[in-house]
Amino acid sequence: MADYRDMWKSLEMDVEKHDELCEILPKFYGDIYLSQENRPEGMNYFNFVVSEVHGLRIKELLEHKEKNEKVIGTFCVFVPDEVINATGAVSVGLCGGSEFWEPAGEKVLPRNTCPLVKASVGAKISGTCPYFQSCDLIVGETTCDGKKKAWEILNEYIPVHVMDLPQMKREKDNLHWQDEIKLFIERLENLTGNKVTVENLAKSIKLINKKRKVLKRLYDARKANKLPISGKDALLISQIAFYDNPERFIEKTGELCDELDNRIEKGISVFKEDTPRILVTGTPMAIPNWKLHHIIESSGGAVVCEETCTGSRYFENLVKEDGKTLEEQMKALADRYLNINCACFTPNPGRIEDIIKYYKEYKADGVVYFTLPFCQTYATEFKKVKDALDKEGIPVIMIETGYSLQDAGQLKTRLEAFFEML
Ligand code: BJ8
């Protein structure tokens, strides 16, 4: 990687501490990703993106900022990227997926907070995440209690706009979410000095839909009997979707999908025949959290789909493109976004329907229900999901695990036993 130290210093980062992270990541990535055999050629682009994760992409963000285009950080798939894009700002997903950031988070948050929240806050207050440092505004949302209260603390370090997400899906909740989108537009208009118009919003809706379509195409390739790509690679692509330039991401993922189609035609697979096909469902896996996928795929399983926010919840369902007024467009946005089935909603039957649907569509043999420690919403929802899966005769195992690799051996043993019985 080129020398970006001056750039990091200009972002007021703790460059020495950041060096520690830079030392861990390449080896970690090499062991998990580059060791895979028979990867599609198209993964080279994503290898490159990871190798430049704190370099070239940050340089691009700073170039945007030089043109007075703002950078907006987000933490949840409910925050509409379309609105950010329409104001000429750039959106980056900021969820922290590494234990490296947890100790810093624990300085201001209770230890028994979910690692995603601790790492996200820790990334900011330790000054070791150039994405955070590049942001002009971050957008929080009222989903789980851990996140909701963390915004108040983060706001001491960086301006935070909080979107009040309803937790039910009635008509009045839809109207409320439309209203929140309107307030978000106003906040961004004030920040950027650019107006959201029917035209620029329509263009952004089309662009983000295109990104969803290419991700859907990638996931469709995983429905093939012979899997042309590993679950680990597909997860990585989903994670990169949150911060890469959208046009380039669409193009490169499209090229990869062409290659995957070709592999499917020729029957080329990255797994041995009869490898158990696993649907992963649960909490999001923020980059570089590749732990569970790596353990599954090195214990004799293959991940065929993620019913998570770094998976299907990010790209399923498009925003209607035919809105003629801003009101119609906001309604179309609210309709699409409130179709996401996060466990912070009550009740949340749509998620169970999705899991069963994907289990069938992706021809899975079993379900791994993943939850980060201290995530009450997903942990509690397990009962409902398990009851429904039991009724359908779908095998499921619950795995609660954080970012540390300490329990890797134990998880491997449990997963191997689960795959054995599929
Ligand atoms: S739409 S899943 S991105 S809220 S894992 S921080 S819920 S304690 S991330 Fe999420 Fe939006 Fe829902 Fe998706 Fe809290 Fe649970 Fe931690 Fe979580």
Image (cartoon, rainbow, N blue to C red):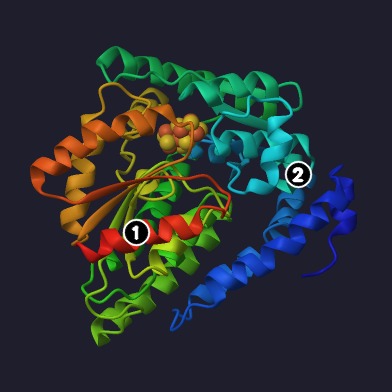
- Which residue is farthest bottom? 266
Q: Secondary structure at mark 1?
A: helix
Q: Quadrant of residue 102?
A: top right
**Label 2–label 1 contact, CB within 8 A:** no
Q: Residue at coordinates 65% horizontally, 24% vertically from top-left?
A: 160
N-terminal label among 2 and 1: 2
Near mark 2 (Cα within 10 A), the count class, few <14, some 14-19 or many ≥20, is some
In the rendered view, does 100 fall on the left or right side of 299? right
Q: Nearer the viewer, residue 173 or 350?
A: 350
Q: Nearer the viewer, residue 102 or 319?
A: 102
In the rendered view, does 406 fall on the left or right side of 123? left
Spot occupied by residue 125 in the image (x, y as percentages of width and height): 76, 34
Between label 2 and label 1, give the one nearer the viewer. 1
Near mark 1 (Cα within 10 A), the count class, few <14, some 14-19 or many ≥20, is many
Q: Residue at coordinates 33% horizontally, 67% vertically from top-left?
A: 302
Which numbered circle lies on residue 218? none
Spot occupied by residue 346 in the image (x, y as percentages of width and height): 29, 21
In the rendered view, does 70 fall on the left or right side of 161? right
Under 8 Å from ligand 1: the CB of mark 2? no
Which numbered circle lies on residue 415? 1
User: Is residue 381 something one can see in this rendering?
Assistant: yes
User: Is residue 55 something one can see in this rendering?
Assistant: no
- Which residue is farthest top? 172
Q: CA distance from mark 2 to mark 1?
A: 46 Å
Q: Secondary structure at mark 2?
A: helix
Q: Which residue is mark 2?
A: 65
Name above or below for residue 46 compared with residue 90. below
Spot occupied by residue 325 in the image (x, y as percentages of width and height): 38, 27
Q: Quadrant of residue 175?
A: top left
Looking at the rendering, in which quadrant would you find the N terminus?
bottom right
